Protein backbone atom coordinates (compact mmCIF):
# COMPACT_ATOMS: atom_id res chain seq x y z
CA UNK A 1 0.00 0.00 0.00
CA UNK A 2 1.19 3.54 -0.67
CA UNK A 3 0.46 6.94 0.89
CA UNK A 4 0.53 10.03 -1.34
CA UNK A 5 2.40 13.02 0.06
CA UNK A 6 3.52 16.50 -0.99
CA UNK A 7 6.76 18.06 0.23
CA UNK A 8 6.79 21.79 1.11
CA UNK A 9 9.13 24.13 2.90
CA UNK A 10 8.88 27.56 4.49
CA UNK A 11 12.36 29.13 4.48
CA UNK A 12 13.92 25.66 4.57
CA UNK A 13 11.78 24.49 7.52
CA UNK A 14 10.46 21.46 5.63
CA UNK A 15 7.31 19.40 5.93
CA UNK A 16 5.55 16.38 4.49
CA UNK A 17 1.89 17.30 3.81
CA UNK A 18 -0.78 14.59 3.87
CA UNK A 19 -4.31 14.93 2.47
CA UNK A 20 -6.23 13.53 5.44
CA UNK A 21 -9.58 15.16 4.58
CA UNK A 22 -11.44 11.81 4.49
CA UNK A 23 -10.67 10.83 8.10
CA UNK A 24 -10.78 12.73 11.40
CA UNK A 25 -7.62 11.14 12.87
CA UNK A 26 -4.15 11.27 11.22
CA UNK A 27 -3.71 8.27 8.88
CA UNK A 28 -0.14 7.79 10.12
CA UNK A 29 1.15 7.05 13.62
CA UNK A 30 3.77 9.02 15.56
CA UNK A 31 6.21 6.16 14.92
CA UNK A 32 5.58 6.32 11.17
CA UNK A 33 6.17 10.09 11.34
CA UNK A 34 9.69 9.40 12.66
CA UNK A 35 10.33 7.01 9.73
CA UNK A 36 9.01 9.40 7.06
CA UNK A 37 10.93 12.40 8.48
CA UNK A 38 14.25 10.51 8.59
CA UNK A 39 16.66 12.21 6.15
CA UNK A 40 18.52 9.00 5.26
CA UNK A 41 15.96 6.20 5.52
CA UNK A 42 12.83 8.24 4.76
CA UNK A 43 11.57 11.26 2.80
CA UNK A 44 13.28 13.74 5.13
CA UNK A 45 11.50 16.60 6.93
CA UNK A 46 11.34 18.61 10.15
CA UNK A 47 7.74 17.49 10.61
CA UNK A 48 4.65 15.92 9.04
CA UNK A 49 1.39 17.84 8.71
CA UNK A 50 -2.12 16.44 8.25
CA UNK A 51 -4.97 18.40 6.59
CA UNK A 52 -8.01 17.05 8.46
CA UNK A 53 -11.73 17.74 8.33
CA UNK A 54 -12.94 19.78 11.31
CA UNK A 55 -15.86 19.64 13.73
CA UNK A 56 -15.00 23.08 15.11
CA UNK A 57 -17.65 25.68 14.27
CA UNK A 58 -16.36 28.45 12.03
CA UNK A 59 -13.24 26.54 10.97
CA UNK A 60 -12.56 25.13 7.46
CA UNK A 61 -10.01 22.47 8.41
CA UNK A 62 -8.04 21.10 11.34
CA UNK A 63 -4.25 20.95 11.18
CA UNK A 64 -2.29 18.37 13.18
CA UNK A 65 1.49 18.10 13.11
CA UNK A 66 4.05 15.60 14.36
CA UNK A 67 7.67 16.69 14.88
CA UNK A 68 10.49 14.59 13.38
CA UNK A 69 10.90 12.88 16.79
CA UNK A 70 7.23 11.79 16.70
CA UNK A 71 6.01 14.23 19.39
CA UNK A 72 2.93 16.36 18.67
CA UNK A 73 3.24 20.15 19.01
CA UNK A 74 0.19 22.38 19.27
CA UNK A 75 1.09 24.66 16.37
CA UNK A 76 3.57 25.35 13.59
CA UNK A 77 3.91 28.77 11.94
CA UNK A 78 5.94 27.81 8.88
CA UNK A 79 3.83 24.68 8.55
CA UNK A 80 0.53 26.56 8.48
CA UNK A 81 1.73 28.69 5.54
CA UNK A 82 2.55 25.44 3.71
CA UNK A 83 -0.82 23.96 4.70
CA UNK A 84 -2.67 26.99 3.30
CA UNK A 85 -1.07 26.48 -0.13
CA UNK A 86 -1.59 22.72 0.04
CA UNK A 87 -5.32 22.97 0.72
CA UNK A 88 -5.75 25.77 -1.82
CA UNK A 89 -4.35 23.27 -4.38
CA UNK A 90 -6.72 20.49 -3.24
CA UNK A 91 -9.78 22.63 -2.66
CA UNK A 92 -12.33 23.14 -5.39
CA UNK A 93 -13.57 26.35 -3.70
CA UNK A 94 -10.22 28.11 -4.33
CA UNK A 95 -10.45 30.44 -1.37
CA UNK A 96 -7.62 32.80 -0.50
CA UNK A 97 -8.29 32.74 3.24
CA UNK A 98 -8.72 29.69 5.47
CA UNK A 99 -9.75 29.32 9.09
CA UNK A 100 -7.62 26.55 10.55
CA UNK A 101 -8.25 24.88 13.88
CA UNK A 102 -5.02 23.78 15.62
CA UNK A 103 -4.31 22.45 19.10
CA UNK A 104 -2.93 25.97 19.74
CA UNK A 105 -6.17 27.73 18.74
CA UNK A 106 -7.68 29.18 15.55
CA UNK A 107 -5.19 30.49 12.94
CA UNK A 108 -6.13 32.36 9.76
CA UNK A 109 -3.70 32.11 6.82
CA UNK A 110 -4.31 34.37 3.79
CA UNK A 111 -2.75 33.76 0.39
CA UNK A 112 -1.22 37.02 -0.85
CA UNK A 113 -1.01 38.15 -4.49
CA UNK A 114 2.82 38.02 -4.32
CA UNK A 115 2.73 34.28 -3.47
CA UNK A 116 3.53 34.75 0.22
CA UNK A 117 1.15 33.76 3.00
CA UNK A 118 0.15 36.12 5.81
CA UNK A 119 -1.11 34.42 8.95
CA UNK A 120 -3.20 35.79 11.79
CA UNK A 121 -1.42 33.84 14.55
CA UNK A 122 -3.76 34.99 17.33
CA UNK A 123 -2.87 36.49 20.69
CA UNK A 124 0.32 35.40 22.45
CA UNK A 125 0.00 33.83 25.91
CA UNK A 126 2.37 35.27 28.46
CA UNK A 127 1.61 33.76 31.87
CA UNK A 128 4.00 31.15 33.27
CA UNK A 129 1.21 28.58 33.63
CA UNK A 130 0.26 29.08 29.96
CA UNK A 131 3.79 28.55 28.56
CA UNK A 132 4.15 26.28 30.67
CA UNK A 133 7.16 26.98 32.87
CA UNK A 134 7.97 27.05 36.57
CA UNK A 135 10.36 30.02 36.09
CA UNK A 136 7.74 32.29 37.72
CA UNK A 137 4.51 31.79 39.66
CA UNK A 138 1.66 30.62 37.45
CA UNK A 139 -0.10 33.97 36.92
CA UNK A 140 3.01 36.11 36.30
CA UNK A 141 4.82 36.91 33.06
CA UNK A 142 8.27 35.48 32.49
CA UNK A 143 10.33 38.47 31.35
CA UNK A 144 14.14 38.43 31.63
CA UNK A 145 14.13 35.76 34.33
CA UNK A 146 17.47 34.10 35.12
CA UNK A 147 17.84 30.53 33.85
CA UNK A 148 20.98 28.68 34.92
CA UNK A 149 22.55 26.19 32.56
CA UNK A 150 25.78 24.54 33.68
CA UNK A 151 26.87 27.50 35.80
CA UNK A 152 25.98 30.21 33.24
CA UNK A 153 22.91 32.42 33.78
CA UNK A 154 20.78 33.33 30.74
CA UNK A 155 18.10 36.05 31.04
CA UNK A 156 15.06 34.47 29.36
CA UNK A 157 11.61 35.65 28.29
CA UNK A 158 8.93 33.04 27.66
CA UNK A 159 6.01 33.30 25.22
CA UNK A 160 3.44 30.78 24.01
CA UNK A 161 2.19 31.09 20.43
CA UNK A 162 0.14 27.96 21.10
CA UNK A 163 3.48 26.19 21.60
CA UNK A 164 6.18 27.10 24.13
CA UNK A 165 9.12 29.39 23.37
CA UNK A 166 12.06 30.52 25.50
CA UNK A 167 13.87 33.58 24.13
CA UNK A 168 17.27 34.92 25.12
CA UNK A 169 18.97 38.01 23.66
CA UNK A 170 22.69 37.66 22.96
CA UNK A 171 25.53 39.86 21.62
CA UNK A 172 26.36 37.60 18.68
CA UNK A 173 24.36 34.59 17.49
CA UNK A 174 27.47 33.26 15.71
CA UNK A 175 29.01 32.50 19.12
CA UNK A 176 26.17 30.17 20.19
CA UNK A 177 27.03 26.43 20.22
CA UNK A 178 23.48 25.50 19.19
CA UNK A 179 23.88 21.71 19.00
CA UNK A 180 25.16 21.41 22.58
CA UNK A 181 23.25 24.28 24.21
CA UNK A 182 19.87 23.80 22.50
CA UNK A 183 19.04 20.43 24.09
CA UNK A 184 19.87 21.82 27.57
CA UNK A 185 17.20 24.50 27.18
CA UNK A 186 14.74 22.07 25.54
CA UNK A 187 14.94 19.52 28.36
CA UNK A 188 15.45 21.91 31.32
CA UNK A 189 13.32 20.90 34.30
CA UNK A 190 11.62 24.35 34.40
CA UNK A 191 9.80 23.42 31.12
CA UNK A 192 7.42 20.53 31.85
CA UNK A 193 6.36 20.29 28.16
CA UNK A 194 9.96 20.95 26.96
CA UNK A 195 10.50 24.15 24.95
CA UNK A 196 11.54 25.69 21.64
CA UNK A 197 14.49 28.06 22.17
CA UNK A 198 15.49 31.19 20.25
CA UNK A 199 18.83 33.03 20.51
CA UNK A 200 18.43 36.62 19.27
CA UNK A 201 20.81 39.34 18.19
CA UNK A 202 19.31 42.82 17.80
CA UNK A 203 20.76 44.34 14.63
CA UNK A 204 18.29 47.28 14.69
CA UNK A 205 14.98 47.72 16.56
CA UNK A 206 13.19 46.63 13.37
CA UNK A 207 15.66 43.85 12.36
CA UNK A 208 16.53 40.81 14.47
CA UNK A 209 18.80 37.87 13.72
CA UNK A 210 17.59 34.55 15.10
CA UNK A 211 18.96 31.06 15.72
CA UNK A 212 16.47 28.39 16.74
CA UNK A 213 16.58 25.06 18.50
CA UNK A 214 13.20 23.41 18.04
CA UNK A 215 11.56 21.10 20.52
CA UNK A 216 11.38 17.67 18.91
CA UNK A 217 13.22 18.67 15.73
CA UNK A 218 16.54 20.24 16.79
CA UNK A 219 18.31 22.96 14.78
CA UNK A 220 16.07 24.03 11.90
CA UNK A 221 16.48 26.71 9.23
CA UNK A 222 13.41 28.62 10.36
CA UNK A 223 10.61 28.70 12.90
CA UNK A 224 7.44 30.70 12.33
CA UNK A 225 5.93 30.53 15.81
CA UNK A 226 9.45 31.21 17.11
CA UNK A 227 9.86 34.41 15.07
CA UNK A 228 6.46 35.63 16.37
CA UNK A 229 7.37 34.79 19.98
CA UNK A 230 10.70 36.61 19.58
CA UNK A 231 9.05 39.89 18.50
CA UNK A 232 6.64 39.67 21.45
CA UNK A 233 9.64 39.08 23.78
CA UNK A 234 11.52 41.96 22.14
CA UNK A 235 8.59 44.36 22.70
CA UNK A 236 8.12 43.20 26.31
CA UNK A 237 11.82 43.85 27.05
CA UNK A 238 11.99 47.14 25.09
CA UNK A 239 14.49 45.73 22.58
CA UNK A 240 12.52 45.96 19.34
CA UNK A 241 9.66 47.63 17.48
CA UNK A 242 6.24 46.04 16.87
CA UNK A 243 6.87 45.63 13.13
CA UNK A 244 10.07 43.69 12.59
CA UNK A 245 12.00 41.71 9.97
CA UNK A 246 13.37 38.51 11.50
CA UNK A 247 16.38 36.97 9.76
CA UNK A 248 16.56 33.20 10.14
CA UNK A 249 19.20 30.88 8.67
CA UNK A 250 16.66 30.07 5.87
CA UNK A 251 15.59 33.65 5.08
CA UNK A 252 13.36 36.49 6.24
CA UNK A 253 9.95 36.67 7.96
CA UNK A 254 7.92 39.85 8.50
CA UNK A 255 6.31 39.87 11.95
CA UNK A 256 3.92 42.40 13.46
CA UNK A 257 2.54 42.42 17.00
CA UNK A 258 -0.45 44.66 16.33
CA UNK A 259 -1.17 47.34 18.91
CA UNK A 260 -4.84 47.59 17.86
CA UNK A 261 -5.94 43.95 18.33
CA UNK A 262 -2.88 42.52 20.19
CA UNK A 263 -2.66 39.71 17.62
CA UNK A 264 0.57 38.63 15.94
CA UNK A 265 0.74 38.60 12.12
CA UNK A 266 3.41 36.66 10.24
CA UNK A 267 4.17 36.94 6.50
CA UNK A 268 6.52 34.66 4.61
CA UNK A 269 6.94 32.20 1.76
CA UNK A 270 5.76 28.59 1.39
CA UNK A 271 7.07 26.52 -1.52
CA UNK A 272 5.88 23.23 -2.98
CA UNK A 273 8.95 21.08 -3.75
CA UNK A 274 7.77 17.65 -4.92
CA UNK A 275 5.04 15.02 -4.73
CA UNK A 276 5.54 11.32 -4.13
CA UNK A 277 4.24 8.04 -2.73
CA UNK A 278 5.48 6.42 0.48
CA UNK A 279 5.58 2.62 0.53
CA UNK A 280 3.99 1.40 3.77
CA UNK A 281 6.19 -1.36 5.22
C1 LIG B 1 8.89 26.03 15.02
C2 LIG B 1 7.90 25.54 14.04
N1 LIG B 1 8.59 24.83 13.02
C3 LIG B 1 7.19 26.75 13.43
O1 LIG B 1 7.47 27.12 12.28
O2 LIG B 1 6.40 27.35 14.13
C4 LIG B 1 6.91 24.71 14.81
C5 LIG B 1 7.20 23.24 14.95
C6 LIG B 1 6.77 22.74 16.29
C7 LIG B 1 7.85 22.86 17.31
N2 LIG B 1 8.96 21.99 17.00
C8 LIG B 1 7.26 22.47 18.67
O3 LIG B 1 6.58 23.33 19.28
O4 LIG B 1 7.44 21.34 19.16
Image (cartoon, rainbow, N blue to C red):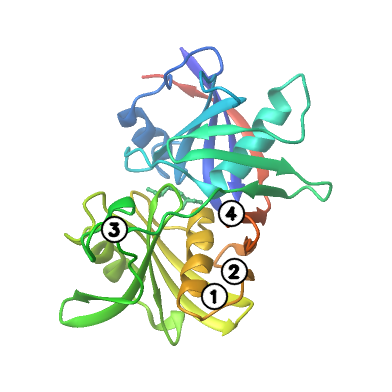
Could you tell which of marks 1 and 4 lies nearer the N-terminus?
Answer: 1
- Which of 82/278 is in front? 82
Residue 14 image position (x, y, % from top left): 53, 47
- Which of 105/153 is in front? 105
Determine if residue 8 is in view.
Answer: no
Residue corresponding to mark 4 = 263
Could you tell which of marks 2 and 3 lies nearer the N-terminus?
Answer: 3
Residue 220 image position (x, y, % from top left): 46, 58
Residue corresponding to mark 2 = 246
Q: Is residue 54 above or below residue 252?
A: above
Q: Give the Cα separation between the discs numbered 3 and 4.
A: 20 Å
Q: Residues within 10 Å of mark 4 (few under 14, many from 20)?
A: some
Q: Residues within 10 Å of mark 3 (few under 14, many from 20)?
A: few
Q: Give the Cα separation between the discs numbered 2 and 3.
A: 29 Å
Tag 1 secondary structure: strand
Q: Residues within 10 Å of mark 2 (few under 14, many from 20)?
A: many
Ligand 1 within 8 Å, label 2 CB: no
Tag 3 secondary structure: loop
Determine if residue 80 is in view.
Answer: yes
Residue corresponding to mark 1 = 209
Task: Give the residue drawn at x 58%, y 25%.
Answer: 61
Residue 106 image position (x, y, % from top left): 54, 37
Q: Quick check: marks 1 and 4 in contact, CB under 8 Å?
A: no
Tag 2 secondary structure: strand
Left or right: residue 28 versus residue 96 is: left
Q: Give the Cα separation between the discs numbered 1 and 4.
A: 22 Å
Tag 4 secondary structure: loop
Residue corresponding to mark 3 = 139
Amino acid sequence: MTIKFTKYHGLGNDFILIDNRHQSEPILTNKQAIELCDRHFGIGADGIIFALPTKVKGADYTMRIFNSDGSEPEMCGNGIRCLAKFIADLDSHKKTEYRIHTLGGLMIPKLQPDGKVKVDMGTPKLLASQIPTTLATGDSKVVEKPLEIEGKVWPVTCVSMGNPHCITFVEDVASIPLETLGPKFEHHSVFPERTNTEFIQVIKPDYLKMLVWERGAGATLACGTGACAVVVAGVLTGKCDRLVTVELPGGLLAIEWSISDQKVYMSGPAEKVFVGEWLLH
